[in-house]
Image: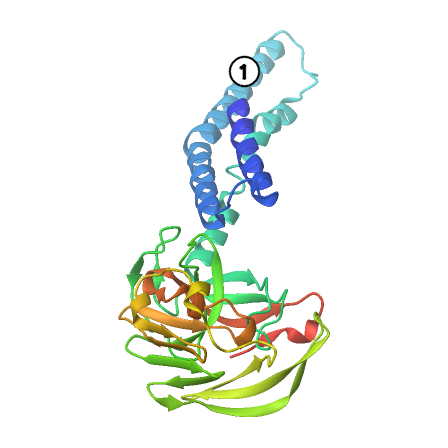
Amino acid sequence: MSSITAVVLAAFVGYGAAWYFGVVEGNFSLLLFLASVVTGIYWLAERFYFLPQRYRAAAALEESAARRQTELAEKGINQLDNHVDEARTRLIMQPWWLDWTAGLFPVIVVVFLLRSFLFEPFKIPSGSMIPTLLVNDLILVNKFHYGVRLPVLNIKVLDNNSPQRGDVMVFRYPPKPSLDYIKRVVGVPGDEIAYLNKKLTINGKPLVKTPLPEFFDEDTLRYAKQFEEVNGTRKYRLLNDDARRSGLDEREVMDFPFKENCRYSSEGVVCKVPEGQYFMMGDNRDNSLDSRYWGFVPDKNIVGKAFFVWMNFGNLKRIGSFE
């Protein structure tokens, strides 16, 4: 079993290394699920087979030692070097290959369940959500806010809240579902979204957009125009870059389901959001690859609602809720 376990552990390490160096496309949810299954099998084997077997061996040792002591006592030999306790401890001790599998099962399964059904951490890799979220912000995502979904498969089994305009949502990137993206919900099913000349209109009603002091991006060392936008009861900040044009050419846009619902022009884009789909945009409006370019996000791709920055090692003041 030790040789088999070494091969299994080496496979996990090899997969992790290949993922880290970009040789393969990793899936942490799947990796954690497989680790839970494998360590769970070892835990059951330890609980119902290996541990009882070691206790039986220890009991047999004690019984043998007791018989020997009785036989020697009958011959008048009463002073013995007795190392039974030490030997018993060694027999009962969990071997390394069980310590690294069955011993890790409780920790791995707790992490798997918490991450799958309650909260999942993410790292912000790009500036598309500036100024709300900065590069390297470590955030928490509420996995049950939009309903309970099966791990790995991401199939919804229990409904909860529906995404609302203004929510910051993590989802599986439609063109490549193995990637997680984060954007703000701008349009819900049935909405007509118009983003023309850098102004957002929902169902014919322009959103209130109030100028704020310019935002200084410490990564690019540039200032950008900053605004507060009001979407229903939600208020949030966004950036505009005068150096970027607002219009889109269809040649810049991917093919995607329901693309016929969108019209592109030199002024921008107008889209009618289909049932079961959502229109997403980054708060860094002119530096965001979002629904304007790759289309709508289907309900099946939803991961959860982002709500809290739990760490930014370069700026501890970032810690806190951004909702």
* Mark 1 burial class by Cα count in 10 Å: few <14, some 14-19, many 20+: few
Place residue 147 in its image quadrant.
bottom left
Place residue 251 in its image quadrant.
bottom left
Q: Which residue is painted at 65% across and 26% down in the image?
A: 86
Q: Is residue 75 above or below residue 171?
A: above
Which residue is outermost to the top? 75
Measured as percent of width and height from the top left, residue 231 is found at 43, 86
Q: Which residue is painted at 56% across and 30% down in the image?
A: 97
Measured as percent of width and height from the top left, residue 221 is found at 73, 74
Place residue 249 in its image quadrant.
bottom left
Q: Which residue is painted at 39% across and 53% down in the image?
A: 151
Asked whether the viewer can see residue 284, the reply is no
Q: In the image, is 304 to the left or to the right of 22?
A: left
Q: Nearer the viewer, residue 3 or 58?
A: 3
Amino acid marked by disc 1: Ser
Q: Nearer the viewer, residue 256 or 284?
A: 256
Measured as percent of width and height from the top left, residue 112 is found at 46, 52
As helix, strand or loop, the secondary structure at mark 1 comes to helix
Question: What residue sits right under mark 1 in the picture?
Answer: 64
Q: In the image, is 260 to the left or to the right of 313?
A: left
Q: Which residue is painted at 35% across and 61% down in the image?
A: 256
Q: Is residue 108 above or below residue 86?
A: below
The type of colouring in the image is: rainbow
Asked whether the viewer can see residue 174, the reply is yes
Q: Nearer the viewer, residue 147 or 69?
A: 147
Q: Nearer the viewer, residue 238 or 154?
A: 238
